[in-house]
Amino acid sequence: MIIINDLAFGYASHKVLSIPQLQVEEGKHLLILGASGSGKTTLLHILGGLLAPQEGTVRIGQTDLYRLSGAQRDKYRGQNIGLIFQKAHLISALSVQDNLLLAQYLAGMAQDRGRVKEVLTSLGLADKLYKKVKALSQGEQQRVTIARALLNRPRVILADEPTASLDDTNAHKVIDLLKSQAEQNNASLLIATHDQRVKDQFELQLNLATL
Ligand SMILES: Nc1ncnc2c1ncn2[C@@H]1O[C@H](COP(=O)(O)OP(=O)(O)OP(=O)(O)O)[C@@H](O)[C@H]1O
């Protein structure tokens, strides 16, 4: 479960976010909406332990994220939070398998080739295991980033505009995929978007524009 209390964040004197209370239970899905510049990416960075708020707390289960040291938070993120950003951030000269093994290594977890294969298979990428990332299409690279985010069976999955550059069919596929993978692990799934197409696929919504 994710719990935010009395959160405030701004860049220099520019106030961006003010969220008195937000709670997302395990296994629930939340869509974060808002116009460009409303703070969606900023909120995901705060929830992902990448950007400390000036005020307030962010808890995942019993863990108060910003009470951890930087190194503890990095480790916690690697083991418990799956991040999917707009940019792939993959190492293009490495194979798909090696990118995922590296993610396990960096999270301080055992390198498990069986799990790598399992998660790639569930995303329709089993035949790309040994392919260099640079030889994949944009859509395939995006699925690799989703595989990497799900690899360590995170408790929380954070996705920033995962459908922005996709056509209708693929946009629905990616959302279904994220939901089903979250359900398999009873993870909380939070998706930031201004893509109106995915709006009616989510019961729980937070609109930053109306806060
Ligand atoms: N590193 C930064 N330094 C200063 N201001 C920033 C920085 N990053 C974002 N901002 C500002 O904070 C506000 C929120 O930005 P953010 O990227 O979180 O919005 P967003 O809702 O994700 O936008 P988009 O939908 O366009 O991606 C914007 O006004 C933006 O200009």
Image (cartoon, rainbow, N blue to C red):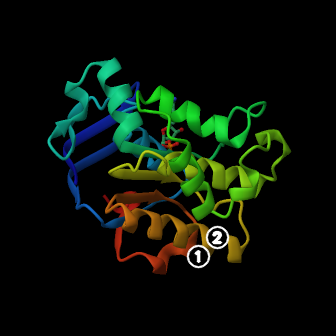
Q: Which mark is residue 134?
A: none
In the picture of the structure, the residue carrying the numbered disc 1 is: 197
| In the displayed structure image, the side of residue 141 where residue 43 appears, left or right | left
Q: Nearer the viewer, residue 51 or 26?
A: 26
Residue appearing at x 40%, y 63% in the figure: 182
Callout in the foreground (1, 2): 2
Where is the N terminus found, in terms of image quarters?
Answer: bottom left
Q: Is residue 37 visible?
A: no
Residue 85 position, x and y percent, is 57, 45
Disc 1 element:
helix
Where residue 9 sits, quadrant-wise, is top left
Q: Is residue 124 above or below residue 13?
A: below
Label 2 near label 1: C-beta < 8 Å? yes
Q: Is residue 175 above or below residue 119?
A: below
| In the displayed structure image, the side of residue 162 where residue 110 appears, left or right | left
Residue appearing at x 22%, y 32% in the figure: 55
Q: Nearer the viewer, residue 171 or 127?
A: 127
Give the mark, 1 or 2, whose residue is nearer the N terminus: 2
Look at label 2 and name its amino acid.
Ala
Residue 71 position, x and y percent, is 34, 18
In the picture of the structure, the residue carrying the numbered disc 2 is: 171
Look at label 1 and name its amino acid.
Arg
Where is the C terminus found, in terms of image quarters?
Answer: bottom left
Q: Is residue 184 visible?
A: yes
Residue appearing at x 51%, y 49% in the figure: 115
Residue 186 position, x and y percent, is 31, 63
Q: Could you give the CA–CA distance between mark 1 and mark 2, rounded to whole angstroms?
A: 8 Å
| In the displayed structure image, the side of residue 200 where residue 60 appears, left or right | left
